[in-house]
Amino acid sequence: MKVEIRVQANAFDPLAELVPVHAAGPQVGGVVSFVGLMRDLNQGDRVHSMTLEHYPGMTEKALAAIVDEAGQRWALDMVRVVHRVGEVLPQDPIVLVAVASAHRGEAFRACEFIIDYLKTRAPFWKREQTRDGSSRWVEARDSDDAAAAGWSNGAEATPSGSAEPTASGEQT
Amino acid sequence: MIRVLYFASLRERLDCDAESLDAAPSTVAALRRELATRGAPWAEVFASDQRVLAAVNQTMAGDDQVLTDGDEIGFFPPVTGG
């Protein structure tokens, strides 16, 4: 399994990131990707921008462990994870998870597993700046914990606790 | 000596991003108790009803994880990436 993990302050182009995943090899039958975008609305407030903090060193280690676990559960040919840090603006891609596999089922499951685990295990924190000039830390959501917990019994199927957007939720 | 790092809202509430402690408490739980004895704002941040996650040497760690000299311990709120 080829693995590429990047944590970066620079913006990225999600479509360009997919090109090498599509070219992962002749045995690849499908690529599934997830792109998390910044929304301009959270908890009823217009959000002007967001700053992502992380724990350098641990972040890369945590992401590598999540991808490694996905590789043990499913037969994957390539996984690419890209995550922004620093300031992001509405509509900016924040995270990309792309998975190439021989079969779509494994690619779908692994992609959802990786983003569900990333949201509860990778040390990133969002601070949002609202239009009125104030700023606040984004609160963790129970629905994200539930989504990650749905995978913990080794289930191969999509977990029933899969995160759904809520009225008070932020993006992704 | 151990190195202790604080992130995100914890760093702001404690007004501290990192420090070194001469002696390593026996476990993560013991370190939490020691930090909580410092008075405000430490006592509130490390009160038992607060959800503060810990990592030892950059891997998520439970309260019973044993600490040894040279360890790096990170404390932070629940994560919100993705």
Image (tube, coloured by chain):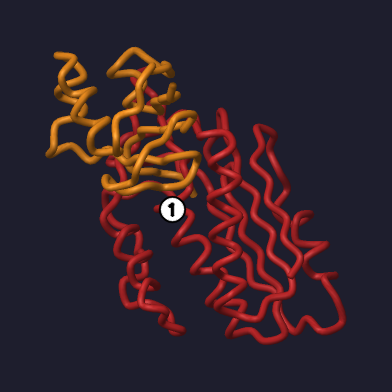
Chain colours: A red, B orange
Asked whether B36 or A127 is in front, the reply is B36
Above-or-below relation of A133 to A69: above
SS at badge 1:
helix
Please provide percent x and percent y for residue A35: 58, 57
In percent of width and height, residue B44 lies at 15, 24
Q: Nearer the viewer, residue A135 or A3?
A: A3
For the point 36% across and 34% down, the residue is: B76
Q: Give the left or right position of residue A151, taking residue B39 as reference.
A: right
Callout 1: residue from which chain? A
Residue A115 vertical placement versus A100 (above, below): above
Residue beneath the point at 82% across and 62% down: A20
Q: Quadrant of residue A111?
A: bottom right
Where, quadrant-wise, is the C terminus of chain A in this rendering? bottom left
Task: State the residue position of label 1.
Answer: A119
Residue A105 picture location, percent across and down: 58, 85
Residue at 33% from the left image edge and 43% from the top image edge: B78
Amino acid carrying mark 1 in the image:
Lys
Left or right placement of residue A135 versus residue B41 in this view: right
Q: Say which residue appears at 18% left-offset and 29% top-offset.
A: B33
Left or right relative to A53: residue A92? right
